[in-house]
Image (spheres, rainbow, N blue to C red):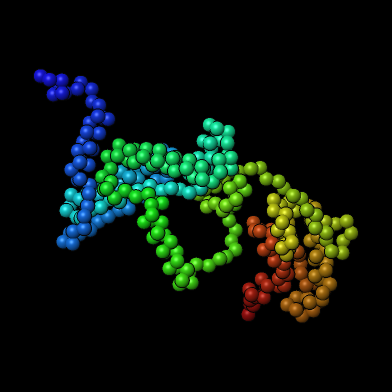
Amino acid sequence: MTEEHNIPKVYDPASVEKKWYEFWEKNRYFHAEPEPGKKPFSIVIPPPNITGKLHMGHALDNTLQDILIRWHRMMGDNTLWMPGYDHAGLATQIKVEEVLKKEEGKTRFDLGREEFVKRVWAWKEEYGDRIINQLKCLGISCDWERKRFTMDEGCSRAVRETFVSLFEKGLIYKGTRITNWCVNCHTALSDIEVEHEDTPGHLWYVRYPVVGEEDTYLTIATTRPETIPGDTAVAVNPEDERYAKLEEELLERINKTGIGPAGLGGTTTAAAVNIEYAPTHIGALPVAVNLNCHAARRAYAVL
């Protein structure tokens, strides 16, 4: 028996999978053409970025898509899985700059625009092909004859045409928004391009003077001192002994108003004053004196 007909003692997945995948591609089992008589089903692959290698998240996502595609194909539907990969813009530029700095000690400014663009395209050829090979190693059944790259001329033209169409309809406009800004690249960044990092904060202690009281202050602490100009009131802990005197003074001032119980006049407008506190932003705290509210709403008489 010749060696080619011998069954290997140890299973070699790489050789077996490659053999059968090439067989599937050669016979165009994944290719699709429009067939009006059949129910259509298609998926455009979420294009992976050419910033490096695929990870386990790509494997899971593409496996789930492949299950759907193969099921619809076996059901006789006109099934297309459109493959492609994404240039990823700034993310790819940063990757190329990191390699350039590490291997040659240079920046994109040292190379100049044209030469740096050539390096980016060379990166695309290397990692674009690697990504496609990784996808094929997963066994996914894309129609590789329709493979696209987001910067292909057809795709770029479609984007420009759509943008111009939206502009002509008055749907493209300028505005002022808070955004992430990269001080090195001098460009805006999306939230997913920003790596958030927790840093220790700082408490700023501010003394608010009490009107009419010399050398009397309310001390507050905040991590956002820039919000102080918007403060409308200060609340304190009623159990804080430092502010017990303020409660007494407020009670005295309220009773001097002469409003009296239920507004009928007198020297006892309020029986007590309690400075309460609540978990809220300091700029949103109101100040109010509620006179005889509980008694007026819950009065009753025994006949």
Horizontal and vertical percent position of residue 192: 50, 49
Q: Is residue 158 left or right of residue 36?
A: right
Residue 55 seen: no
Horizontal and vertical percent position of residue 136: 29, 39
- Residue at 69% of width from left, 62% of height from top? 283
- Residue at 22% of width from left, 47% of height from top? 30
Horizontal and vertical percent position of residue 180: 58, 53
The quarter of the displayed image where residue 102 is located = top right
Instruction: Work out whether 288 lies above or below 26.
Output: below
The quarter of the displayed image where residue 36 is located = bottom left
Quadrant (top left/top right/bottom left/bottom right) for the N terminus: top left
- Residue at 40% of width from left, 38% of height from top? 126
Q: Is residue 55 left or right of residue 232?
A: left
Residue 226 seen: yes
Q: Nearer the viewer, residue 77 or 132?
A: 132
Horizontal and vertical percent position of residue 193: 52, 48
Q: Is residue 150 left or right of residue 99?
A: left
Q: Nearer the viewer, residue 61 or 111?
A: 111
- Residue at 81% of width from left, 71% of height from top? 255
Q: Nearer the viewer, residue 51 or 115?
A: 115
